Image (cartoon, rainbow, N blue to C red):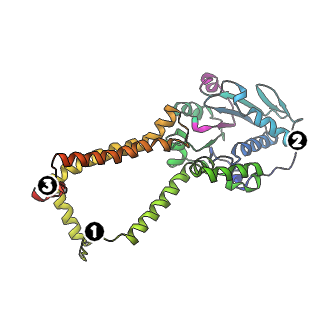
Amino acid sequence: MSEVHLPKVYRELWNPYRYKVLYGGRYAARSWTIARNLIIRATQTETRILCTRELQKSVKQSVHRLLKDQISLLGLDKFFDVQQQGIYGANGSEFMFLGIKHNTEEVKSTEGIDICWIEEAHNLTESSWDIIDPTIRKEDSEVWLSFNTRFKFDHVYQLFVANPPPPGSLVIRSSFKDIPKYVTKTIDKQIAGVKKNDYEKYLHVWLGWQANFVLIAMTGALALTLIWRLLPESAPPDNNGMQPKLILKDYGLLLANRGFMKYGILTGAGSGVIMAFVTAGPFILISYFNVATEHYGLYFVIPVFSFFASNLVTRQLAGKMNIPHGSIYHSFHHE
């Protein structure tokens, strides 16, 4: 067997965990690393490995070709018998390939699995997970999941990343920056081109969608700093304005004011609707209308301009209806 080198970021894979989750941006060598790791394990001891994914109608849609290529690169063609429906080792090891959605009953009846590798796990539904997890029940068995980050709504993302993962979990986030020795000149040029021409796509695809939120947070921090440093206070200076007793007193007056409560409740309800739309909008556009992940932001130009336009229309209508500026303030003042 040829000498094997695995990226440092994935070294912990050799240690035992019930769940091993590898996720992040593109070209992080996750599938390549898992394939090599499983092949090496299969040569060391008899291991039964189920390779699966949510949608897989045939072996061609599986990691069969990836494993076959890695077996050849490692010089193990004589050890493994690569057949169309499975891969078999000389020591009794076996790689099986089944799709969860189209082979539900067959997956349920699979026995004695040592390792289950779920590729493209971002597509895995909660119902499919509820099939896989209890099926892999052999003592010291493991479930490996690999996926590119897509939505925070994805079941495996919620299960292992957004919330504290189940006990016995190893969760590794990675991108191409974690494997500099493995980035080819072709990939390096491709990444540089995307970064130059479409920075949003570069963040989302190559670094993972969380990078977008890091950029937004940095932009917000910069904006807040500029506002604090450059914009003067609109109200007269009040040295006592930040005293806790006065702040609580003012809030008490506001909450006791019927006019404020009317506008507050209506404004809160309206803001809630807007936030619900902003939160669910990307998921609906991408999942139900098949909008590309790097393009859905363009569709948000429509509601943004609509928001500004509605404010302008409201101002014009207020003028025609003789509603004076500051009417909300006066309603608070007189109640």
Residue at figure coordinates x 39%, y 45% from the top left: 305
Please tell me which of labels 3 and 2 falls first in the chain: 2
Please tell me which of labels 3 and 1 falls first in the chain: 1
The residue wearing badge 3 is 331
Name the side, left or right, on which 102 lies relative to 313: right
The residue wearing badge 1 is 234
Residue 142 shown in magenta: no
Name the side, left or right, on which 29 lies relative to 136: right
- The secondary structure type at the circle numbered 1 is loop
Residue 118 shown in magenta: yes
Marks 3 and 1: which is nearer the front?
A: 1
Q: Reply above or below: 318 against 113.
A: below
Q: In the rendered structure, are the residues bearing label 2 and label 1 in contact, judged by CB atoms less than 8 Å apart?
A: no
Query: Which quadrant does the N terminus fall into?
Result: top right
- The secondary structure type at the circle numbered 2 is loop
* Amino acid beneath label 1: Ser
Q: Position of residue 87 (x, y in %)?
A: 79, 31
The residue wearing badge 2 is 75
* Amino acid beneath label 2: Gly
Query: Which quadrant does the C terminus fall into?
Result: bottom left
Q: Position of residue 267 (x, y in %)?
A: 26, 48
Q: In the rendered structure, are the residues bearing label 3 and label 1 in contact, judged by CB atoms less than 8 Å apart?
A: no
Front residue of 90/286: it is: 286
Front residue of 279/194: it is: 194
Residue at figure coordinates x 23%, y 75% from the top left: 240
In three-dimensional space, the C-alpha distance between marks 3 and 1, rounded to whole angstroms, equals 21 Å
